Amino acid sequence: LIICGNHRSMIDPVILAISTKRQIHFMGKKELFENKFLSFIFRNLGAFPVDRKGVSLSAIKNSLNVLNNGGILGIYPEGTRVRTGFDEKNAKSGIALIANKAKVKIMPVYMEGPYKFRGKLRLHIGKEKDYFENYSGKLNSEKYTEIGIEILKDIYNLKNEGIQ
């Protein structure tokens, strides 16, 4: 299972992690792993680095390893924090590629609310979905991008924004 959501704050992975009984293995930008202390903590929590510039083969391999061993993968499909709402140009194709290779479903989630101490946060959880059930044969990068946009729409639609 891949859990994917909107990403507005550095605490988003913590919120998702404490909302489930199972461990979620998150991708994190490689810069977070440059500090030895933080790298030690993140790796012990099951996180692994991703190079956001271009294709990160090691992140894809780590993702497939997590999923093929029955783990849960957490990905923010926009690739960075976004506070401006839905924009299909922010959708990345990697999540679709990974889900297809691992043959797993994706669960969209949407977090909203103020990020301050004692602020009320809402976590909208969507239904697991197989984004590839209607596709057969080999998929190209354009199709992965289309599916990435569909995933991002499903995330933001959980807030009832009515993205078409």
Image (tube, rainbow, N blue to C red):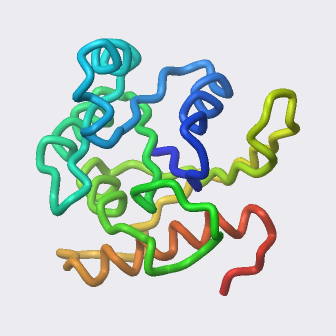
Please, is residue 18 above or below residue 90 in the view? above
Q: Position of residue 30 (x, y in %)?
A: 25, 39
In which quadrant will I find the C terminus? bottom right
51 vs 153, nearest the viewer: 51
In the image, what residue occupies the spot 63% across and 62% down? Answer: 83
In the image, what residue occupies the spot 63% across and 25% down? Answer: 20
Q: Residue furthest left?
A: 57
- Left or right of residue 155: residue 111: right
In the image, what residue occupies the spot 13% across and 41% down? Answer: 58
- Left or right of residue 62: residue 19: right
Which corner quadrant of the image does residue 156 belong to? bottom right
Which corner quadrant of the image does residue 158 belong to? bottom right
25 vs 87, nearest the viewer: 87
- Left or right of residue 162: residue 92: left
In the image, what residue occupies the spot 61% across and 33% down? Answer: 16
Please, is residue 74 above or below residue 42 in the view? below
91 vs 64, nearest the viewer: 91
Please, is residue 160 above or below residue 89 in the view? above
Which corner quadrant of the image does residue 160 belong to? bottom right
- Left or right of residue 87: residue 103: left
Q: Position of residue 139 (x, y in %)?
A: 22, 76
